[in-house]
Image (cartoon, coloured by chain):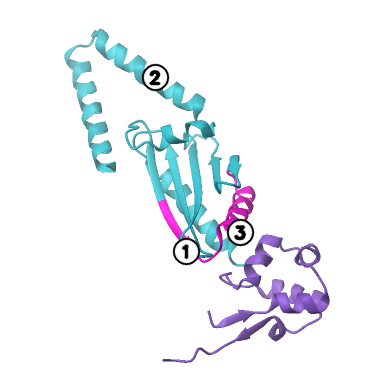
Chain colours: A purple, B cyan
Amino acid sequence: MAIVIKLDVVLAERKMKLKELSEIVGVSTVNLSILKQGKVKAIRFSTLNAICSTLNCQPGDIMEHIDYIKN
Amino acid sequence: MKNIKHFLAIISIVLISWLNIKFPNSRILMVVGALLTVVLIFNFSIRKRIQFKSYFLNPWNFLVSTQFSNQNTEISTGLMYEKMLEVVRDSNYRVRDSNPLKKSIFLTTPISLKSWGKNIYIDINESNLGKSTIKITSVALQVYSWGKNQQNFEKLILEIEESLII
């Protein structure tokens, strides 16, 4: 996948646990764990907004697009 | 196997109908009818018990209609098991049994005017490192399913897909 999720990095910087974020944002820990692994199909703007508001960050801080080097 | 089952079911219905016309007062038909009723009642009485999973999933069980699907996911078995529990708890299925060690879930649908009720067995297995395969088997307590089983089945698969949009 070319989109890399860096939620764990931002969480570590904010010294926040996934469970705490889940309770504030209202998204289950299972869903956040799947998001953290970058294995969700899509993310809603409302979810992204809630995460960014809670973590006081930009969407680009929690996800990054990486171009794979072609052989 | 499914075609053989349907073929045998049709042959049985035709044979019983023919025998009923040919020998209207035959005791054999009454015995066959009584036996079928007993088996049907037996199936209904045990359908909510996980101990009878292998009985309902047996390919030689001619009185049930089964349908199965394998879904490959990139999510690990543990996480997928939790996810599946979340999905089914939000739906109208009733969780009868869930085993975190075997990563299996057993659901039932209620009996309604349109449906006799279904048993749904979900097994999550590890396919590759960190990936999983979900096997969903839907069992309807009737020889031939008229499409309701398929509808329920597709609805569950859609719910799983949609749950991955957070």
Left or right placement of residue B52 versus residue A31 in this view: left
Horizontal side, residue B77 vs residue B59: left or right: right
Q: Is residue A33 visible?
A: yes
Q: Which residues are magenta?
A: B69-93
Element at badge 3? helix
Position of residue B39 relative to residue B117, above or below, is above
Q: Is residue B111 visible?
A: no
Tell me where residue B15 appears, x and y as whole percent.
Answer: 20, 24
Q: Secondary structure at mark 2?
A: helix
**Relative image position of residue B84 (x, y in whole percent):** 58, 53
Q: Which residue is under mark 2?
A: B37
Q: Amino acid at mark 2?
A: Thr
Using the numbered discs, state the Cα–Cα distance from disc 3 to disc 1 in whole angstroms: 14 Å
Residue A67 against residue A7 in the figure, above or below? below
Mark 2–mark 3 Cα distance, whole angstroms, equals 43 Å
Residue A23 x/y as whole percent: 79, 62
Nearer to us: label 1 or label 2:
1
- Residue A17 position (above or below residue B123): below
Chain identity of mark 1: B
Relative side of B64 to A43, left or right = left
For the residue pair B66 and B11, the one nearer the viewer reads as: B66
Q: Which residue is at 39% across, 19% downward?
A: B37
Between marks 2 and 3 in the image, the one whose residue lies nearer the viewer: 3
Amino acid beneath label 3? Leu
In whole angstroms, how far apart are the C-alphas of marks 1 and 2?
45 Å
x and y, in percent, of residue B115 in the image = 47, 37
Look at the numbered discs 1 and 2 and tell me whether their residues touch, using CB distance below 8 Å. no
Q: Which residue is mark 1?
A: B128
Q: Which residue is mark 3?
A: B79
